[in-house]
Image: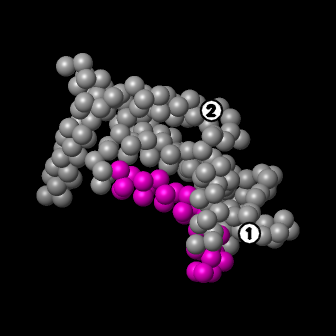
Amino acid sequence: MQNSKVSHLIVVLREAAIESSRGKDWRPRLALLLWFVYTFFRYLNDPLYSCIISPLNLGIHELGHLLFSPFGTLIGVFGGTLLQLLVPLLGMLNFYRQQDFFAIFLCFGWLSVNLFDVAKYIADARAMSLPLVTPFGLAGSVIHDWNYLLGQLNLLQFDIFIAWLVKAAAVIAMLICFAGGGCLLRVMKEGRAG
């Protein structure tokens, strides 16, 4: 019974995505999707790569620390990553309300970029070699989020494995971006030609 409800929901969403995409101009959207393709391969080939939207994501990350700091040190430290990952998900909800399914798939690309950056940060938890920034504290008061978090949870020795899992999630999110965005581009192109 539950399986048929999920199948029905998928069919309804697929039809809504196709219908909302008909007649839209595919060309500027192709440029955005190609940018994510380029970014994806850069992240895969260079573990230290940061894309053009990484500074925006870092700002959102730092805001997360501020917003979640009233809930204690552990939640405040985790709040940076939490907000960084929540914002693309909230973008998906916003674009769903607008019935812009292509933008939803681009948000999967944005989520992927964030996951790649978080994986890089987690992988550095023991080494602590990445430069750290904070807009709110003195240079001496800056802590490495993931060194602190994994240390508090007694998981520091698993930093590389946890980073690998997060990177795998980044790859999956980006593949969803490509598959969904590519399908909708085809619908847009066929709809304009016909």
Residue 160 image offset from top left, x and y in percent: 67, 51
Q: Bounds of the magenta span?
A: 68-95
> Which labelled disc corresponds to residue 72?
none
Disc 2 packing (10 Å; few <14; some 14–19; many ≥20): some
Residue 120 seen anywhere in this rendered image of the structure? yes
> Which labelled disc corresponds to residue 42?
2
Give the quadrant of the C terminus.
Answer: top left
Q: For residue 82, what is the image quadrant?
A: bottom right
Q: For residue 53, what is the image quadrant?
A: top right
Q: For residue 89, what is the image quadrant?
A: bottom left
Eye-nearest disc, 1 or 2 = 1
Q: How many marks?
A: 2
Task: Please indicate whether residue 2 sits to the left or right of residue 84 in the image.
Answer: left
Residue 134 image offset from top left, x and y in percent: 74, 63
Residue at x-position 35% and y-position 27% = 26
Q: Which of marks 1 and 2 is nearer the N terminus?
A: 2
Residue 11 image offset from top left, x and y in percent: 18, 44
Whether residue 96 is in magenta: the answer is: no
Mark 2: amino acid: Arg
Residue 178 image offset from top left, x and y in percent: 42, 34
Disc 1 packing (10 Å; few <14; some 14–19; many ≥20): few
Mark 1: amino acid: Phe
Q: Which residue is label 1 attached to? A: 136
Dominant secondary structure, magenta: helix
Dot 1: what SS?
A: loop
Pointers 1 and 2 in contact (C-beta within 8 Å): no
- Name above or below for residue 186 compared with residue 132: above
Task: Please indicate whether residue 159 sits to the left or right of residue 171 in the image.
Answer: right
Q: Nearer the viewer, residue 152 or 184?
A: 184
Whether residue 75 is in magenta: the answer is: yes
Residue at x-position 47% and y-position 53% = 88
- Name above or below for residue 136 compared with residue 14: below
